[in-house]
Amino acid sequence: MAKPTDLVQGTLDLLILKTISLEPKHGWAIAKRIQQVSQEALQIQQGSLYPALHRLEQQAWIKAEWRTTETGRMAKFYSLTRSGRKQLERELANWVRLSTAINIVVQEA
Amino acid sequence: MRILDKARLRLRSLCRRPNVDFELEAELRFHLDQLIEEKISSGMPPAEARRAAQRMIGGIAQYKEECRDMRRVNFVEDLVQDVRYTIRSLAKSPGFTAVVVATLALGIGANIAIFTIVHGVLLRPLDYPKPGQLMYLTAEAPAIGSTRSALSAPEYIEFRQMNRSFAEVGAYSTGGTAYTTGEVNLSAGGRPLRVRSISVDAHLLKALGIQPEQGRFFTDEETSRWTGTLPPPIAILSHELWQTAFGGRPLVGQKLEIEGRPHEIVGIMPPEADVMDHHTQVWLPLWLPPNMARQREAHVLYVIARRKDGVTAKMAQTELSAFLVNWGDRVGTRDHVPTNHPLRSVDHTLQLQSLQDAIVGNARRPIWVLQAAVGFVLLIVCANLANLVMARAGSRRREFVLRTALGANRGRLLRQSLTEGAVISGAGGILGLLLASASVRALIRAYPTSIPRTSDLTIDLPVLLVALGLSTGTALLFGFVSLGRRRTSSMMTALKEGARAASGAWRHYARRGLVIAQVAFAVMLVIGAGLLVQTVYNLTRIDAGFDRSRLVTFSMTLPMANSEPETRAQAYQRILDRLRSVPGILGTAAMSGLPPNRTRDAIATPIENYTSDNGKPFAIIDYYQFVMGDYFGTMGISIVAGRGFERTDNASQGKVAIVNEVLAKRIWNGQNPIGHRLRPPGGSFGASDNVWHTVIGVAKDVRQGGVDRPAGTELYISLDQHDVAPPSMNVVMRTTLPPAALSGTIERIVGEVAPAVPIVRLRDMDSVFAESIRRPRLLAQLLGAFAGLALLLAAIGTYGVLSYMVTERRREIGIRVALGATRSHVLTQIMKQGLQVTALGVIIGLAGALAVNRLIASLLFRVQPTDTVTIAFVIATITVVAVVASWLPAWRASRLDPNVVLRDE
């Protein structure tokens, strides 16, 4: 299982921002979505997920509201704010630059 | 925009904390439910799914904590929580709290009090504009050990004219001829007050740069260019005297009687204006009789000068040195001018120093010694604090480990510990500050003249900053020590061991080390205090040359303006006669100068068949003592050769004098002085002409310039033979009665003879002595108090460590007793441990004391810094204290019942 510490520093934020960029999701759905899309390679522990969500909310990059899920329960849905969208773009650009660089180094060696 | 959003969110987390927590919990519960559902749908039985999910999710509390961390409002939240928790937990152990806060308050309080003195006296600039420019010019005569004495009037005027370094050079005198003792009688109708006076010239007021609060200053015409035969009848009052004696009513332009002569009040000084810490109440114009203004031998003026902008102290010094090379050539006389190589006893040189240094004088070293002492006390307090906290941390180990298990991280625990430290040292600091302010005020009240610059002793910003610094330092110490070295890896063991948790070996060493340090510091302090107590004892035991038991004295002044030398002599004679008839008074006499602390007269006295080192037919005699009545008998001064004054001398034509041993030795150098003649200037005591006096006896030396200073040369003249008297005399009575019982009688008798004259300083000679050694006494008392405190703290430290050790080793002791160890065996073993620690501390402390005590050598009198008696006494005291402190825990250990102890475990 990939522990959160195994993720490159700051990557979790990027994953969360990307995941909710299309539509608002609650915490559970965010974790599941990342797991699915990464084909089970990335397992997000709730122990790192919720603190991260709180941090992002505190940065005012995401906002939360209570809504009803399909199953009729109340859950906290997170969506991107305007500054969050900008942050996502920045982090994406960073990530592309960083991963390209790493790839070059790794393949070179 | 984002900043506002963030602020709003954080504010929300702070204000609506329960709400936020609730939301978080709901969110996590939702997550848990989803997990369970997922597991059930994958085919797990519901109960097992729930368990598995919960295992996966772990403790909700920890997430809550982490999420709160993410919200970044923790700091405030935690602080509030920590403070409340700290107060709760401290309230639960009131004994611990009381001891810690009280020792901290004492340690911090003592430090603040002494730092107030260090700051107010040594560090704070003087209360004049640009105080750094002010310098003090004094005459030094190293060959006869005279230092910081006054300049002659011609010298002062020459220096004023020659120098290029100073913007203004002024002079003052607390003596002078018109006003003899730096005090005057002042009256506005009723009974006069005796107030402290100073005579200043106009230049001095300009040099100091003070402005009168009301009215004006003296002008040049009223001081240096005044040509009258008496000083101009004008005066300036201090603000304080104006307020206390005259209630602040308009006074400028009105007349008051000073020394029986009406003086116009031309001004009022601003509050706290003073010169050289004289506590001046009345400022008078400086005036010298024409003969004194010309006489180079009469050293009467103290000189204060203000450097020009841009001139450094060094430049001024260089300029003065150049003058000293050829002062005589510059002023056109070789007659008693300052020189740069004052080798002979008649030579003197001039010295410049900063005014602040001159005011502080020799109080500097005692003050720093006290500061060092309270620094030691604070170190001991901190060591004690660390020890207490470590002991407490040992028993709180379980609490901390439990909290770590529940999700508190190390930083959080540290913050909690620091908060505890801050609360405790905050309380200690505030109490200490109150203590310091009260004790400084009490100190000033009890010893008004023992500390220079008392009016500058206030707890102001720098002092408060130091207080804050001390509190913060102790808070940090407390926090780090109480958290200690705790590894989470040992969590399990700690939880299992519970309260009885074994502390690591380092902790033992640390605690013993702290006690050793405490003992060492205490030893150093107690030795220092012991040496000073010895010094004071030696000073009180000193033979000042007269018998001071059952001796009562007072002083009075018959103003010069409305009395003649002859009428004064009659008045004093009548007072002495009437006092002698009072039952209980065995003998009376009067003298011009009261030993053992008078200012040097330094009067040039022609001596028959004598040539001084510089070829003059006169010698400068340090002290003139004009006496009335049976002086030597009343004072108990023995006559070592010849005879004392006798009644038959009064009628005889040939005038007689008595010299002291030092004068006899210096002038006649081993020959018999009796029969030789000298000619004291009659003006010095009110006689109209200078006549030859024959030496009839040699009196034992009396210390006049301080009990710890060698006696100077002294000449006694009997006023009864001349029928004149100077204005001020000190009456002395040999009596079985205390001063208080005599005061009514004295008031009545003096009132009958001289109704308008106040009686001042009525006291017994023992208090005169106590007054003369007040500084060493105060230093010894303070240092003694600090040493006692240090000793007490070291004892508490030793006791604490041993009791803790006994508690920790209960089991071992129990087993050993069960196996046959006797009680006395256990007792001696524990005591040995305590005494070992003490012995190490004593050895280190002795080494420290030997290294440091050189610094107080100059404060000691007739005792060496390495005095073996003091050191032996200190070691004995510390050993006794250590035995007592170790005995209690050792006794408790020896009483342990193995049955109880072993069953407990």
Image: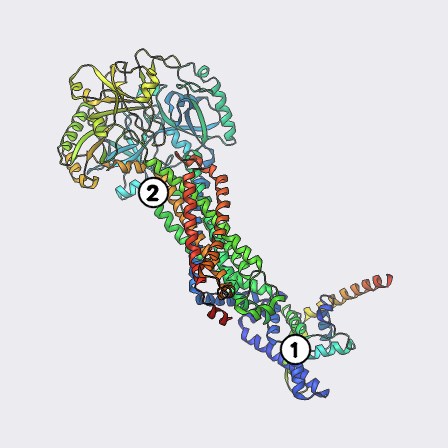
Identity of the residue drawn at 43% across and 37% down: B867
Q: State which quadrant residue B403 falls in.
A: bottom right
Q: Which three-letter amino acid code belongs to the residue tagged 1? A: Ile
Is circle 1 on the same chain as circle 2?
yes
Location of residue B451 with respect to A36 vertically, above or below: above
- In depth, the one of B335 and B601 nearer the eye is B601
Location of residue B781 with respect to B569 vertically, above or below: below
User: 10 Å neighbourhood of mark 2: few (<14), some, or many (≥20)?
Assistant: some
Q: Residue lying farthest top?
A: B609
Identity of the residue drawn at 77% across and 66% down: A95
Mark 1 lies on a secondary structure that is: helix
Where is residue B550 drawn, in percent x and y?
22, 36
- In depth, the one of B871 and B457 nearer the eye is B871
Where is residue B304 drawn, in percent x and y?
41, 30
Left or right, residue B276 beside residue B503: left
Q: Which residue is the site of mark 2?
A: B447
Left or right, residue B899 beside residue B505: left
Q: State which quadrant residue B58 falls in.
A: bottom right
Q: Which residue is the site of mark 1?
A: B57
Location of residue B881 with respect to A70 vertically, above or below: above
What subunit carries mark 1?
Answer: B
Q: State which quadrant residue B453 falls in.
A: top left
Mark 2 lies on a secondary structure that is: loop
Q: Residue lying farthest right?
A: A108
Where is residue B508 drawn, in percent x and y?
54, 57
Assign the N terminus of chain B to one quadrant of the image.
bottom right
Measure how far apart labels 1 and 2 are at the Cα level: 72 Å
